[in-house]
Amino acid sequence: MTSSTHGWQRVSLVALAAGGIAGLAVPAAQAASYMSVEQAQKAAFPDADRFDTRVLRLTAEQAKALDAVATVRQRGEIRRIDAWAGARLLGTLYVDDVLGKVEWVTYALALGADGSVRSLEILDYRETHGFEVRTPSWRKQFVGRRADQPFHFGDDIKNISGATLSCAHLTAGVQRLLTLHGQLGATPR
């Protein structure tokens, strides 16, 4: 080989290192905010004229009881937002985070006054894959579910290929929140 050929190879390797490696790098998580907590409140309870928010910090006993229902990595606190129309409780919105695959997924679960699921909204999704959990058809699988009527991921709640961990962890999160709601009681304290 001539020195000009070697020079070309060197330039090509430098170009590959500069531009090509970036294309081969593992993509960073790309956070996407789809809805604010306030928007989720209004979407779930459009007739509400007041929302009362409390931050719940689980006791060790509560956390252990919830782990018996579904183990999933969650952050330490959960927001409970009671929706009111005058003196009538319309329902409760819980805002929680579960681990998707490696990043947190923030979601809002709306329960009617009877304790059944009204809606599930994905507020923030930080994973590079699996954003399909936000599709209405997947989230609708939870509507009407209750703590006293067990449901299982893979049987009652269908998986989305490429989003398996997010689907499984969100399902477990919903199960835990339904159980927590039953422990706390539908009436706010």
Image (cartoon, helix red, strand yellow):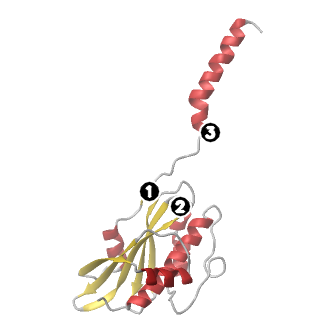
Q: Sequence order check: which comes first, mark 2 or mark 1?
A: 1
In three-dimensional space, the C-alpha distance between marks 2 and 3, rounded to whole angstroms, equals 22 Å
Give me the disc on residue 32: 1
**Along the line of sight, the residue nearer the viewer: 60 or 66:** 60
Task: Say few, some or many: other residues with alpha carbon within 10 Å of mark 1 (under 14 / 14 to 19 / 20 or more).
Answer: some
Give me the disc on residue 24: 3
State yes or no: discs 2 and 1 in contact (Cβ < 8 Å).
Answer: yes
Query: Percent from the top left, x then y, of residue 99?
Result: 51, 65
Query: For the residue labelled by badge 1, is the local secondary structure a helix, a strand or a loop?
Result: strand
Can you name the residue that lies furthest to the right here? 1
**Along the line of sight, the residue nearer the viewer: 56 or 23:** 56
Query: For the residue labelled by badge 3, is the local secondary structure a helix, a strand or a loop?
Result: helix
Query: For the residue labelled by badge 2, is the local secondary structure a helix, a strand or a loop?
Result: helix
Q: Is residue 128 above or below residue 147?
A: above
The quarter of the image holding the C terminus is: bottom left
Query: Percent from the top left, x then y, of residue 53?
Result: 28, 77
Of the residues shown, which amino acid type is indicated by label 2? Answer: Phe
**Point 77% across, 9% down: residue:** 1
